[in-house]
Image (cartoon, rainbow, N blue to C red):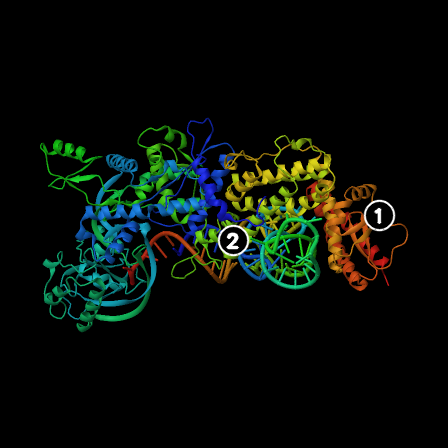
Amino acid sequence: MLDKTLSPAGYEPRLYEGWEASGAFTANPASGAQPFAIMIPPPNVTGSLHVGHALDVTIQDTLIRFRRMQGRDALWQPGTDHAGIATQMVVERLLAAEGLDRRQMGREAFLERVWKWKAESGGTITRQLRRMGASLDWSRERFTMDEGLSIAVREVFVTLHRQGLIYRDRRLVNWDVKFQTAISDLEVESREVKGSLWHLRYPVEGEPGRFLVVATTRPETMLGDTAVAVHPDDDRFRDLVGKFLILPITGRRIPIVADVYSDPEKGSGAVKITPAHDFNDFEVARRHSLPAPTVLDAEGRVSLAEIEADLRAVPGVADPAWTRDLAGKDRFEARKALIAELERLELVEAIEPHTHAVPHGDRSGVPIEPRLTWQWYADAATLAKPAIEAVETGRTQFVPKQWENTFFAWMRDIQPWCISRQLWWGHQIPAWYGPDGHFFVERTEEEAAAAARAHYGQDMALTRDPDVLDTWFSSGLWPFSTLGWPEKTPELARYYPGDVLVTGFDIIFFWVARMMMLGIHFMGDVPFRTVNIHGLVRDERGQKMSKSKGNVMDPLELADAYGTDALRFTLASFAGPGRDVRLGRQKVESNRAFVTKLWNAARFCEMNGIAPDAGFDPSAVATPLARWIIDGANAAVAEATSALESYRLDDYAAALYRFTWGGFCDWFLELAKPALMGPDGAEKDEVKGAAQHVLGAILRLAHPVMPYVTEELWDRFGYGPEGSLIRTPWPTPVAVPGAEEARAELDWLVSFITEIRVVRAEVNVPPSVTVPLLVQGASAETLARAARWIEPIRRLARATEVRPLDGKVPEGVAQAVVGEATVMLPLAGVVDLAAERTRLAKDHAKAEAEARKIATKLANPDFTTRAKEEVVEETRERLRSAEAEAARLAAAIARIAA
RNA sequence: GGGCGCUUAGCUCAGCGGUAGAGCGCCUCGUUUACACCGAGGAUGCCGGGGGUUCGAAUCCCUCAGCGCCCACCA
């Protein structure tokens, strides 16, 4: 017997272990089945599961289980990402707590420590994925720093380098001062900062007392100014172009150049040019061949090395001794000091408060410093072209489609991708330098040595580039590196391209775009056919979850409290296309009720001896109730299947819910009770047969999203051996002869019972009062139906009998209009006649209004001539029925008129 | 500045040319032998505003407003 209450904790771990042990999650390349592959977005190896993962995993697991049941050879590729900066950050923090610093430890010892941390915490996320029921093929688990994946990384790097698509360049990068590494444009986020706009006076050379005023938010960079630009059409400064200024503090002589970059509307109209510390200025400097001295070091401190030679004493403007004191000062300290000095020199014209956007490192949270450094770059623009084309031609499609615009906008204006990072944790760049700086990009140290020998004509000591690659470089290879590339494995041939990639919109650029670029370049085909983009999980008020707001929900805690199935169902049901998911506890709680409902429905079946019957032929039943529910299950199967095929998990969840609760539980099981409790016979057998058939269909339909409770019930009922639902074929509609008649019959019954219930509830008849139903104006068919269904009607409508009204209307009736018939409930002494009159009058008014509305429409000749014929006919039919209903209600009112 | 999305019942959302829907919440009634994590019933809507197209608009177009997000932007 099933327990009275369900306890997910009692069966979830057991079922998962059973599935995994039996190889149910394992892809089967040897099978003849059509493959279906999903590559998991690899979570950070040292991370733990958050609600975003939970949504991502629920969607993917639902899809993979669905396809597996459809008979596809399903591969859901698991694995984790080494997550360069994030992981290094965590370990450095741990070290700091022990008073250690990675630089003191040295690279090797530090990396050893990171691997140790990975070994300790690396299992957390995979355990948590299991807890969510994720049917990942663990036998193929990969890590981005596995030997195999590292080989792929080096292969890609070397190949792209030989093709000229990876190169070294010295240009401005986004420098993260805290982590002391370059980061890509995508890792920079701008934040609004309240600061000041300083208007500074730069003395014009040879014209004492004349100044050109520049406005800046970053006075500390003025040490590196090599020009001031004005707009060529700006009359205010026309005579100054070509002249020179004496740069305060350093005393350097700098030109006034005309450049369209200068915006006459902004600041003072003249802009200082600091090429080594500003992206725009860098461009201006290139156009005017200006020098670009660096004045801030890797830690964001003033460095005078490159301007030492420029320092000149200029009375009242620059004092080298003071300036030399700035060396080593932090950029913000230097700013204060400089302003104080400029004020002393009366070179500050004005200071205005100014709010502006300042780029910050997304991980470090500190302002980014543009810095001129040598880095490795990938030629993203070239790689992007085929990726753009693949989406344009539909070889890869985004769902929802509008995300393609986002993808295009970014890809069409893509900048060189800075792929080197000055970190230790990651794939070290396979480049070796000779003593003269000549470098060799090779797969291995041996190959590099050989290349050096060939180059120098002798063995030469080489130094490996200390930098590592951007984490997204290796994640970009995920769809094929996990399948064994560069080896030509059978898996690679079979599972690439994957069918669908499921992820959030926040990593379209970081990851999806990179996989597209690298996948097409190295595999010659797109990495996946479909990209299913889902929204963000927010809290119930629509706020983004964050630790600082304290509104973070822990998916595992929710799973513990309400069961994994309830959490998964909730996430799926809110995962509508292009919408964020607002998750609240109560929502999970109320979906737990659905899981419980299913459990109880199964219990009811069990108690009534409903058991799996392999010999049952759903197409051979004659009982209308059986035909009707089997037909209903067919419709649910069709709905669920098409919803899943089109990534509409919300529709899938809704279809399941509606059919299971509304169709199967509320109506079928209730209507089946008389037969089930009645004598044995053909009807009872058929109803039981239909019940087991439909319950089995429901369990299969619900399994992708609610794997645990469905498997538990499937097993306990004996639909199949322990743990077998996961590989049971997905249901398909079955032929139901006479389905249409059965539908007409049962639809009548449902509305008949509903109408009686409405009347009883409205006039407050307690359920304990049972009354006969006297029908007036009923067709022979209606009377026959009422006779056939008398037991359910007695039960559900609290009636004693149904018979035609013979002659006079009894005193004190309540009346209901059902189709062509009017049903009277003799309730003398119970019914409040005045209330009943009011109720009927209200219904009558409603019917009349409806009829009038339709009549007006039909009176419009434009409508009848221009609208589609079937629409007009349908409208006429609606008018007839509304008028008839109004007439019957009018008659009912007349019958009880005072 | 450029772009995208959203605005429908108290809440969360579906519907996207032809009768305004669901779930939750709320109110009333109820313990009828699966389930009170339940059952039955009910109320609640100028479908953001304005204009247009159409026989017909929540649905298509234009426009305005509000909210959210992405990209760009250190004068």
Question: In the structure shown, which secondary structural element does the residue marked by tag 2 occupy?
Answer: helix
Query: In this picture, is A524 found above or below A353?
Result: above
Q: Is residue A145 visible?
A: yes
Q: For this view, does A700 lie left or right of residue A319?
A: right
Rendered location of residue A660, percent (x, y): 61, 45
Residue A618: x and y, percent? 65, 33
Q: Amino acid at mark 2?
A: Val
Label 1 CA crowd tier, 10 Å (few <14, some 14–19, many 20+): some
Amino acid tagged 1? Arg
Q: Could you say which is closer to the camera, residue A658 or residue A291? A: A658
Q: Name the residue tied to disc 2.
A: A588
Residue at the image point whose x is 50% and y is 56% from the top: A585
The x and y percentages for residue A519 are: 35, 36
> How many numbered tags mark residues here?
2
Vertical position of residue A241 compared to residue A416: above or below: below
User: Between A237 and A712, which is closer to the camera in this rendering?
Assistant: A712
Viewed as shown, does residue A605 lie left or right of A831? left
Image spot of residue A428 (x, y percent)? 23, 42
A890 vs A807, left or right, is left
Q: Nearer the viewer, residue A615 or A477?
A: A615
> Which residue is identified by label 1?
A803
The chain letter under disc 1 is A
Task: Using the rendered image of the protein, determine whether residue A577 is visible from the camera's viewpoint.
Answer: no
Q: Secondary structure at mark 1?
A: strand
Asked which quadrant contains residue A452, the reply is: top left
